[in-house]
Image: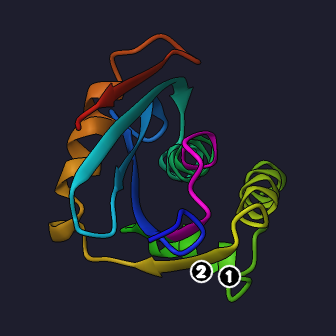
Amino acid sequence: MSELQRFYTLQFDGACSGNPGPAGAAAVLFDEDGSLLYHFRQGLGYTTNNVAEYRALILGLQQALLKGCKNINVQGDAQLVINQFRGSCRINNPHLRSLRDEALELSRNFRTFRISYMSRVYNTLADSQANLAINLQEGQVEEDRLY
């Protein structure tokens, strides 16, 4: 199967210790057969949970593009962020609106892009990575290649 036909799954999550508080963002990338390919983590400094969720989405999209992914299914447990991204929910906060716009711009670089909500009980891997990211310096990105 060519790279243009291969589908990847990206799961994302943000975490805060308090809201606002020290925060981290994370994403995990799976091959279409379900094999875990990468963990990505980023320290965010002191921010809100909604910002952490958006930063996790952006981190994941950036990294998937860098890895050459063309077709992607994105999943997260941040219902508000997903609804705002889809345009079905208003964004009153200008900072969140700019983060949504950044994520939208990144999403346009994929040949096929889908985003959907997943229950937090199924997002434990991204959640655990986001909690690890809280301990990183602001702006610090870590990547684990798992194949």
Q: Is residue 108 left or right of residue 73?
A: right
In percent of the image, x 43 and y 65: which residue is there?
8
Residues shaded magenta: 64-72
In percent of the image, x 51 and y 43: which residue is there?
52
Tell me the quarter of the picture where residue 91 sits.
bottom right
In percent of the image, x 33 and y 40: which residue is there?
38
Whether tag 2 and tag 1 are in contact, CB under 8 A, the answer is: yes
Which quarter shows the C terminus? top left
> Which circle marks residue 83 in the picture?
2
**Viewer-proximal residue among 94 and 144:** 144
Magenta highlight on residue 105: no
Magenta highlight on residue 66: yes
In percent of the image, x 18 and y 69: which residue is there?
122
The percent position of residue 11, horizontal first and vertical second, equals: 38, 59
Q: Which residue is identified by label 1?
A: 86
Q: Is residue 74 left or right of residue 90?
A: left
Tell me the quarter of the picture where residue 69 sits.
bottom right
